[in-house]
Amino acid sequence: MTTVHNNANGDGDGDDENDASFQFQNSYIAQFKNRPLESLTLTTLRTKADPPDKVDLSSLVVPERGYPKVTHLVDYPTSAAETEIEKHDRLLVQGMYFMKTQDFTKFHYDNVNDNAIAITNANANANDGDADGASKTVKKVCLNIYLCNRRIPYINSLIMGLSSFSTKENELDMNKAEIHLLNTEKRTERLHFKYMRETLSKLPFVHKVHNITYRDEIYANITDRELEFREMFISDEISGLKICIESGLPYCIMMEEDAIVPVDFMTLLHSQIIDPLEKGGHIRIDGSGAISVLSLYSYYNLVVRGTNRLHHPEYTKRYYPQDVAKTNAERFSQDLPPYTPEYNILEYEYMYGTVAMMYTRDSAIKCVEYLQKVGVNPIHNADEFMNAEVYFPATMGIPRKHVEPSLVNHIGYYSERMADFTARGMFSQLNTDSRFMFDAGDL
């Protein structure tokens, strides 16, 4: 079996197949890499400790027919992994084409910084019982997007999703967000961020670009060295939360650039998440209420944990066909009813990741205070302090919640470290949610 690697220049060299340091994406390849697939029988799959007559055949891990599949670019462990990676690649290409062809001058967006009036009007409208109609023009969400000068322009796909709407009426919902771009690039060789300066910063719906190169005040005394990764991570999260707080808006969303949002995202965010929480009395229009942190991404198909692993044949064969999002064309061909967006907010314990985190203004203020307290000589990364049940949620006295299925998905398959020689060109993992629907299409 020939395995394609990426060398320091990002080109496949296809050698050193038996290098022990190579991190295989798939357990079958790791175990059977020197044996042809046709030789893999139930006998070879049994462990040496179990005699043939005592093996539980239902527990055997049998590779999917035709997989692992080796291609010139990616080794696909299962058909589910191949399908999801192809969806990921399609969104990347589509995003690049979108940014080159979209006429943003025709975009209906009012980039006005008048948040105090906006909040006053929102409260007045809520009291008058007419909040739904008036909220079309009231900014309620500070949306911060963390990005850096990446080789793979994931930000294009995210911008495409944010500015794609099925109707002109839904396009107006973009006015409910104040969008900030947070440049976290700190690598000396990539500080010249031409795309940010000449393209992204000029988008009509970008309120402001922030160069997050500064340290939070808790690190002011560290002058003899660079901050370590954990310290930089915490400092960047604090900086983003402070920008949200300073905006004066009731809700804060912190999103990574390799996230993807669906068509009509702002409409769905309000109709499926914010409005139900407000009407149910869980949160209030001023940004207070019963949320510590709400992840808009549900961490469903993880690589290293859980039962929904795309590289596992058992999940691929039994559950993926039911889980995977189906467009209306697919649903019609399978005699299924048209797609109807429906999201639920559930308590869910998970301690990693910052793909798309939502806070109220109140919880953002308290999260800054908490991170500043634990950020000096940190024992964990920022995401663990923010997510894990025993840390920030415990301080708030409110469990972490997430949206099910994901309203915001993760598509960051190609790592910035893919060109790193020591990573053998394959430091890539597709943590995603196969149930995510970008666009169901016409009926």
Image: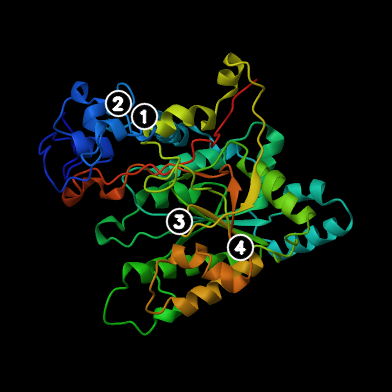
Q: Residue at x 45, y 80 (%)?
A: 217
User: Which image quadrant for residue 218?
Assistant: bottom left
Residue 94 falls left or right of residue 288? left
In contact (CB < 8 Å): disc 1 and disc 2: yes
Q: Which residue in the protein does label 3 denote?
A: 353
Up the image or down, 401 lies above or below 161; here it is below
Disc 3 residue crowd, few under 14, some 14–19, many 20+, Cα 10 Å: some
The alpha-carbon separation of the residues under discs 2 and 3 comes to: 30 Å
**Which callout, 3 or 1, points at the residue further toward the start of the chain?**
1
For marks 1 and 2, the one nearer the N-term is 2
Of labels 4 and 3, earlier in sequence is 3
Pointers 2 and 3 in contact (CB under 8 A)? no
Which residue has dot 2 on it?
67
- The three-letter amino acid code for the residue at tag 1 is Glu
For the residues carrying marks 4 and 1, which lies nearer the camera in this image? 4
Q: In the drawing, what numbered circle is on residue 82?
A: 1
Instruction: State the CA–CA distance, disc 4 to disc 3.
Output: 16 Å
Disc 3, disc 1: CB below 8 Å? no
Q: Kindly indicate the quadrant of the structure image that contains residue 406.
A: top right
Q: Of the numbered discs in the image, which one, if any, rests on residue 399?
A: 4
Give the mark nearest the N terminus, 4 or 1. 1
Q: Is residue 331 at all visible to an observer of this figure?
A: yes
